[in-house]
Amino acid sequence: MKKSIPVTRSSLPPFEEYCAEIQSLWDSRILTNQGEKHRKLEEELASLTGAKNLILFTNGHLALEYAIEAMGLKGEIITTPYTFASTTQAIVRCGCTPVFCDIDPVNFTLDPAKIEALITPQTVAILPVHVYGNICDVEAIKALADRYRLKVIYDAAHAIGERYKGQGSGSFGDASMFSFHATKVFHTIEGGGLAFPDDSLREKINAMKNFGQINPETLPYLGGNGKMSEFQAAMGLCNLRYLDENIRRRKVAALRYLRNLSGIPGLGLSFSDNRVEYNYAYFPVIFDGFKWDRDAVFDRFTREGITPRKYFYPLTSSFAAYQGRFPIGETPIAKRIADTVLTLPLYAELENEDVDRICELIVTA
Ligand SMILES: *Cc1c(COP(=O)(O)O)cnc(C)c1O
């Protein structure tokens, strides 16, 4: 029986370390609602991401929805269909209209040259995604947003711990959403964070994620429950101590993949932008013009007990949930990438021999 290899494997701190981290909660009995662990994690993550403000949420998706609501956005939001369901679902659930823009064929993020033609009097914001940790063209997007007075909210779910031209990944646009889901490079089991520069939003967003209350008798905002618990925050504090080491180990695996797979006709590989300090969150490979198509490679892996992921497939613009309701722009590049991509297994504990076995399967296909 050959060893099976999952596409990802959640990192965990030593069991005793987590127990020690949560022990004080048995004395304080403060288990949630902005306790001590929560405050500490917010500070550490603001510093890591270069954010002026960072607010924690019980997951990344809600952070995105609260960002859209806190900025009072109503209208069209230009975004990418090449993303996880969450990005588009957040826009739609907040009552806005997604307008789908095509992506760059090399780093898979929103193509700024194609945004302007989609701007209408109803456009209120741009919502790009730092796909796989590839940082968007933040300068071009800012120039457009300034010119047309649009808000920019980044889906930075994949970009924790990264820098672009030396600046933290939480320092761009009007807000950046991070996901701390169990499968991400850094996690709080479930969790998320919203980074933003505007201090005046701080009280509002903190109140909104706590039922709209500033205090039990003062409720100036519509709100719900988006709070992160102390147990989640404690997991984050522990995991943060291992983040650098995890990224270092991911990098070793990613570079080994790159070495093994470079120069093979029909394979598209990533990590080529030397302005980005990557976190090696994913290892996407584009099978375009390769001797086998993506689905054939996927099946071959599956038979061998290896689980790659068609990530992202299908495009969010094709979800049945939206059928006929939104303008589905021409996004041929996004379509082609979605039809040819596989993300290969990548996590800190992935061993060299696993990487070699996976590459062997491709090379000898
Ligand atoms: C994981 C992810 C989200 C959602 O984050 P959760 O913390 O799971 O709610 C949103 N967008 C992208 C691109 C993601 O990968």
Image (cartoon, rainbow, N blue to C red):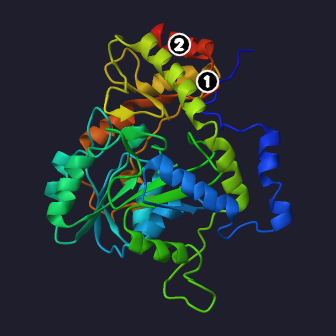
The amino acid on which the numbered mark 2 sits, given as a three-letter code, is Leu
- Give percent across and percent down for residue 38: 64, 61
Q: Residue at x 59, y 30 (%)?
A: 245
Which quadrant of the view contains residue 213?
bottom right
Which residue is more in the foreground, 119 or 170? Answer: 170
Above or below, 111 relative to 297:
below
Q: Is residue 119 visible to us here?
A: no
Left or right: residue 146 compared with residue 170: left
User: Which element type, helix, strand or loop, lies under badge 2?
Assistant: helix
Q: Is residue 199 visible to us here?
A: yes
Q: Residue at x 47, y 69 (%)?
A: 66
Q: How many marks?
A: 2
- Give percent across and percent down for residue 50: 42, 50
Q: Are marks 1 and 2 in contact (CB under 8 Å)?
A: yes
| Residue projecting furthest to the bottom | 217
Q: Residues within 10 Å of mark 1 (few under 14, many from 20)?
A: many
- Give percent across and percent down for residue 135: 35, 41
Image quarter (top left, top right, bottom left or bottom right) of the N terminus: top right
Could you give the CA–CA distance between mark 1 and mark 2, rounded to whole angstroms? 10 Å
Q: Residues within 10 Å of mark 2 (few under 14, many from 20)?
A: few
Q: Residue at x 31, y 43 (%)?
A: 109
Above or below, 84 relative to 286:
below
Left or right: residue 194 compared with residue 333: right
Q: Residue at x 37, y 67 (%)?
A: 198
User: Which element type, helix, strand or loop, lies under badge 1?
Assistant: loop
The amino acid on which the numbered mark 1 sits, given as a three-letter code, is Ile
Q: Give the residue pinned by disc 1.
A: 306
- Give percent across and percent down for residue 240: 61, 43
| Residue projecting furthest to the right | 26
Residue 361: numbered disc = 2
